[in-house]
Amino acid sequence: MAVIAIYSVKGGVGKTTLAANLAWCSATISCRRTLLWDLDAAGGAGFLLGIEPHARRSAGAVIAKATDPARLIRKTGFANLDLLPTDESIRAIEAQLTTLGKRKRIAKLAAQLGKDYERIVIDCPPVLGETSAQVMRAADVVIVPLPPSPLSARAFDLVAREVKANADPHPPILPVLSMLDLRRSLHKAARDANPDWPVIPYSSAAEQCAVQRQPVGAFAPGTPAAQAFARLWTAIERKLAKR
């Protein structure tokens, strides 16, 4: 089992789209039993997989161990891919984790879930704090989507410091330039400054994920975006193989 955390300190960089598409790649390309664990209160990961939220608010109870996470897991319409959804109760996760005083609560929950899954992809909330620290301790690799701008390297350094401060040894960290449009000079400059970073191109197909409520590989497999997600997943699997 391996935990892949999709983490950014900034919203609007395609974090949730990346998480949903990588989870689909894990389940479909690698044929691995995969769980997408949504810890972002916005609930976008479930929406992108066509899952409607439950009226019952129990996501926070999973963190407190008042609810067995297996009871909340939902099948998606894709083979090998399940979802552990979020809801508004997860907004209290930071206070919960601080009050509990258990530094590895999320890691222990992931290990429990790992009895049934080979890959767990976590869509993290875009905040620094106890939640992010615990996810870093649980993760085997951290994927960091970044905006293609002159600030991208600075944002990555911030996340790298957070990871290294909260996990010893720290997991590999993979920066990704997200929504790259080489027609824009700032985007091209960011790419030139970081030529070795993986790229997810700006794409109407990727935007359609929210309309189709499917990962792009499911409805537009031949597009550059679908191919970029697949290449990134292959790079992640290679990193995991070196553990």
Image: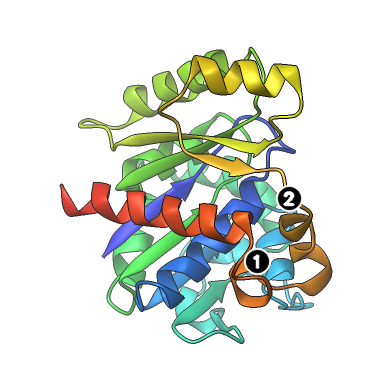
Quadrant occupied by the N terminus: bottom left
Three-letter amino acid code of the residue under disc 2 = Ser
For this rendering, which residue is in front, 86 or 67? 86
The residue indicated by pointer 2 is 203
Label 2 sits on a secondary structure element that is loop
Q: Quadrant of residue 86?
A: bottom right
| Residue ranking furthest to the left | 242
**Image coordinates for residue 58, horizontal then vertical, percent:** 64, 70
Q: Residue at 30%, 71% (x, y): give it.
A: 118
Left/right placement of residue 237 relative to residue 81 reads left
Mark 2 vs 1: CB contact within 8 A:
yes
Q: In the picture shown, does residue 125 fall above or below 130?
A: below
Which numbered marker is on residue 79? none
Q: Residue furthest right?
A: 211
Residue at 68% x, 69% y is 46
Q: Is residue 139 above or below residue 154?
A: below
The answer to which image quadrant residue 172 occupies is top left
Q: Of the residues under marks 2 and 1, which one precedes in the sequence?
A: 2
Query: In the displayed structure, would residue 189 be above or below residue 178?
Result: above
| Nearer to me, 150 or 13 | 150
Question: How far across and down, in percent of the image, does residue 126 sit?
Answer: 63, 37
241 left or right of 220?
left
Q: CA distance from mark 2 to mark 1?
A: 10 Å
Per the image, the residue denoted by label 1 is: 216
The amino acid on which the numbered mark 1 sits, given as a three-letter code, is Val
Say if residue 174 shows up in the picture: yes
Q: Is residue 206 left or right of residue 132?
A: right
